[in-house]
Image (tube, helix red, strand yellow):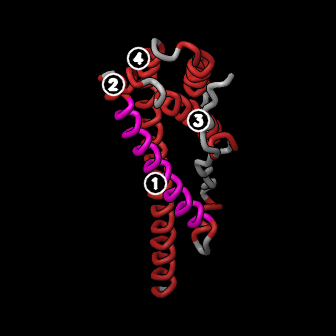
Amino acid sequence: MVIAIVLIVLLVIWVISIYNGLVKSKLKVDNAWSQIDVQLQRRFDLIPNFVETVKGYMAHESETFEKIAALRTSWANSSSVGEKAKLDGELSGALKTIMAVSENYPELKANTNFSELSEELRNTENKISFSRQFYNDSVTMYNTKLELFPSNIIAGMFNFKARELFATESDEARKNVKVDFNN
């Protein structure tokens, strides 16, 4: 009788331990996503000032500015990791275009606001990159726990679901920016 009680207690402790590990991993994924969200919001907050600074010098790039405005609106209305990843890739491409085109405007490059804002955007892009990597590492560890025995049994019992990795779906975001002044 005593052995049965000890085994039951050990089993309960084992289940609690695995459950708590899964909860910790899930919360780490949620925190990692929140960090991406914070950095993306920071970038979106910087963009209007950046665009206004650049507009006066690059009037013929109005299509890019309109695309950025539309992407900001879409991003604010999106909720899933996949949607935000796709929009993030498109926005990164548009920002790369502006940065590449700005190389041909010495007055713009000399502008203090432009220099400060582009440095802030570069720093933010680095933070976003790090946050994405941390998120994907956290998701991979969490999803791995959901698949490995014996935690997969506990995960199934308590309805833990796999999370989506932050991946760029846009082929455009994977390409180098091509700047063509002949159009």
Q: Position of residue 120 (x, y in %)?
A: 35, 33
Compare marks 4 and 1 and give the one earlier in the sequence: 4
Give the label, 3 or 2, closer to the camera.
2
- On-image quarter of the C terminus: top right
Q: Is residue 130 magenta?
A: yes
- Identify residue type, mark 2: Ala
Query: How far, Cα to Cα, is label 1 from label 3?
Result: 22 Å
Q: Nearer the viewer, residue 94 or 134?
A: 94
Q: Which residues are magenta?
A: 118-146
Compare marks 4 and 3 and give the one earlier in the sequence: 4
Name the residue beneath numbered marker 4. 53
Compare marks 4 and 2 and give the one earlier in the sequence: 4
Name the residue beneath numbered marker 2. 110
Q: Secondary structure at mark 3?
A: helix
Name the residue beneath numbered marker 3. 93
Main secondary structure of the magenta stretch: helix
Q: Nearer the viewer, residue 139 or 39?
A: 39
- Identify residue type, mark 1: Phe
